[in-house]
Amino acid sequence: MKREAQLTIFLLILAAIFGLYARLAVPVRDNFPLLDGGLFYAMARDLLANDFHWPLTTSYNQLDIPFAYPPLGIFLLAWLHRLSGVNLLVLMRWIPALVSLLTLPMVYLLARQLLESAEEAALATLLFATLPRAYEWIIMGGGVTRAPGTLFYIAFAWAAYQAFSHRSWKMAIWAGLFGGLVVLTHPERALHAAAAGLLFWLWLERSRQGTLRALLIGGGTLLVSAPWWGTVLTRYGGGMLTLAAQAGGPRWLFWAPLLQLDFTDEILPLTALLAIYGAFLAWKDGQRLLPVWFVLVFLSDPRSAPHVVGVQTSLLAAIGLSRGVLAVVEGKGRWQEVFQQARGRAAFAYLIVLLVFNVQSNVSVLHSHYVLPEAEQKAMQWVARETPSESRFLVLGWEEIPGFSPLLEWFPALSERGSASTLQGREWLTGKANFVHRVKTFPDLYACLDQEEACLERWATENDETFEYVYLSLLEPGGKARLSRLADALRESPNYHLIYETPEVLIFERLP
């Protein structure tokens, strides 16, 4: 028992070391939030300007976007700024990273309930600490909502599982509290929490008492989250929530990330294979809840599933590693014991080397690809000073996937001008301005980089947009500057005038 306790402590120490480095390396290294968060930055400013009274709309992107997003993370950001005086951008670097660290002990507590031993739970925590999809999306600037949403989601699963497996009314109350906090923080995590709670009830306790506990959890969730959904229903009606839910995409999309092993990272496919092997072993041993929960995540909300399923992936991978790869050989012969020890140590050393490589490689990619360059920040500040406040821009850069573009996310927030090409926040709009429509038409706009100016005019007409300026980022993901055919065409066009030029950014005014 002493040896098992030592192994558990050792694995948890490794999880803490790897988890700290993976989550804190980027905010320590950079002076700007990772990737996204511009919408929440603007909403926090709106709250502060409105003295914490809930605004009807947000100033972000000049589109009168309803202030309907679950507000807990945004209120927390604004409140910490008011209390401490620390700049909002600094807080947006550190809040997601620090909150994401709290998911590690929470995963261990959940794993202790679902796995056979403390060592397996500690191993799952170590795998979770280093799994990129378990932390990269929640340490970004938008993690001011995703990080607490993920923490409350794991806490809800921990409490709900115990409520039904241990027949505990106390844990049902805790589950209702955590469920309400999930709803108040992040809509997609709320869908996954609801799916997990329903699964645990159906799987573990479909009795009369279990049904009453499920109702208590659901009622508690609704009660705690009432300030948000009550306000949204009163102000905007039920159609607003339905409209936002459409951004998750059709349910058949769940097969694409699942078949591509997109639920884990690209650098360490071994974790995905271990999770598949672990699912097989768990199913074979009659422990089928985890594999079913894994698949259910993709059915609940396909778009966010790859960033939520890290919990189940880590637990299943721990099963595959501990009960399969590191399982002891049978027999008591001297050579078998030597082989057993050597195999175990070699496999463990190999695991540590992979984890070190995995974490370092991922941190380097996040730093080089997903932090808004200082040259872009300066250009947006120039726009805020030198252009009319009602101006609208067409903003384009070399990032082909709009959700991975800090340029598109942060331009409306830092310049305080409108961006026709920014998608963030459009979940709450209708018609051609809606998020789903703009996702479909963005490739047409991106293709304009290799065409003449008429391409911009055509795209704007087809999407009912107007613009007075064109902002072209010349930086590719990774930081290398690259010109485009569109940039040359606008330089030569009599309809556009170059008003700002650096090696990284060109800004053109569209002449009347």
Image (spheres, rainbow, N blue to C red):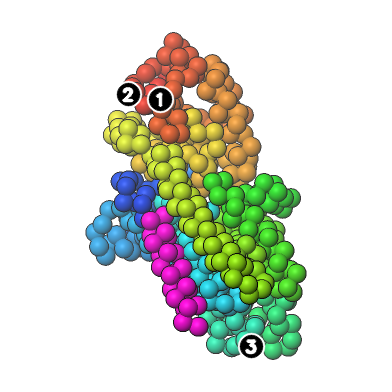
Is 91 situated left or right of 271 in this image?
A: left
15 is within the stretch colored magenta: yes
Residue 305 coordinates in the image, percent (x, y): 61, 56
Residue 278 coordinates in the image, percent (x, y): 66, 64
Marks 2 and 1, how far apart at CA: 11 Å
Of 232 and 80, which appears nearest the observer?
80
SS label for mark 1:
loop
Is 214 situated left or right of 364 in this image?
A: right
Q: Which segment is the magenta one?
A: 1-22
Residue 481's tag is 1
Q: How many marks?
A: 3
Closer to the observer: label 2 or label 3? 3
Residue 494 coordinates in the image, percent (x, y): 44, 11
Going from N to C along the chain, the mark reached first, 1 or 3, is: 3
Residue 502's tag is 2
For disc 1, the neighbor class at 10 Å (few under 14, some 14 to 19, many from 20) is: some
Of 174 and 428, which appears nearest the observer?
174
Residue 59's tag is none
Q: Amino acid at mark 1?
A: Ala
Marks 1 and 3, how far apart at CA: 61 Å
Closer to the observer: label 2 or label 1? 1
Instruction: Give me the residue at 60% from left, 74% from top.
Output: 115
Q: Is residue 70 visible?
A: no
Instruction: Give me the residue at 47% from left, 61% from top.
Output: 129
Going from N to C along the chain, the mark reached first, 2 or 3, is: 3
For disc 2, the neighbor class at 10 Å (few under 14, some 14 to 19, many from 20) is: few
SS label for mark 3:
loop
Above or below for 391 versus 133:
above
Q: Amino acid at mark 3?
A: Arg
